[in-house]
Amino acid sequence: MSIISRILRPFSTMSSSPARSMSPPEGAQTATVAAGCFWGVEHMYRKAFAGKGLLDARVGYCGGDTQHPSYRSVCSGRTGHAEALQIIYDPSQVTYRTLLEFFYKMHDPTTANAQGPDHGTQYRSAIFFHDAEQEKIARDMTEKVNKQWWKGQVKTEIVPAGEWWDAETYHQLYLDKNPMGYECPSHFLRRFPPLSE
């Protein structure tokens, strides 16, 4: 992690909690991605998909092997977790494929364990699939963007979702509450040509 990131990003010793109990509408689905600092990832998804199928989004920790990880422990790189975003969406309004296409446009998937100035396994690029259909779509999309957009350099992991832990409350909607807060410079929407089949 860069010195600037350490100064600008608050630390907490409070541990996270398992995913809160939500009652999403019948038919809603879950997508989980990691693309570096979760503040910017959440902010960009909310801005792009508000009113267009996004029902809820939470930042948190996924892909690790410890219980009740805290922000400080995840930042140490010793828990195995990635800073991630979990999206509850209405598939009748937005498809999983569309959410992943946006994922591959809004961050740099070619750097292993880093986004911009942020370095460490917690900043890795990952798609955490929730079922076999999501895995199939994730692998298909990754193959296409790797060939057509990222010149064979994609390093994104495609792995089962596993256990999700909500990040501490102050991380939720962080950039809405702190408009001048840190935002990874790698988080911006690239202009790529439409994917061919």
Image (tube, rainbow, N blue to C red):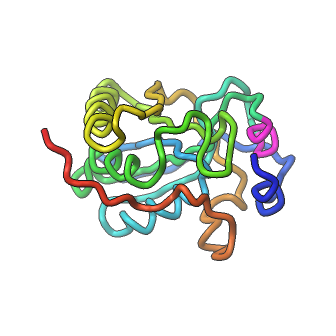
Single out the residue that lies furthest toward the left.
197
From the top left corner, tell me how far across and down residue 133 is, in percent: 28, 29
Location of the C terminus by quadrant is: top left
For residue 31, side relative to residue 77 (left or right): left
Q: Establish if 26 lies above or below 164.
A: below
Q: Establish if 63 lies above or below 42.
A: above
Is 71 magenta? The answer is yes
How many discs appear? 0
Residue depicted at 70% across the width and 43% down the height:
17
Residue depicted at 53% across the width and 48% down the height:
85
From the top left corner, tell me how far across and down residue 83 is, in percent: 62, 43
Residue depicted at 47% across the width and 38% down the height:
110
Magenta span: helix, strand or loop, mainly? Answer: helix
Determine which quarter of the picture holds residue 69.
top right
Residue depicted at 36% across the width and 27% down the height:
131
Is 2 magenta? The answer is no
Single out the residue that lies furthest toward the right.
13
Q: Establish if 107 lies above or below 140.
A: below
For residue 37, side relative to residue 157 (left or right): right
From the top left corner, tell me how far across and down residue 61 is, in percent: 63, 40
Residue span colored magenta: 70-76
From the top left corner, tell me how far across and down residue 64 is, in percent: 65, 28
For residue 87, side relative to residue 67 (left or right): left
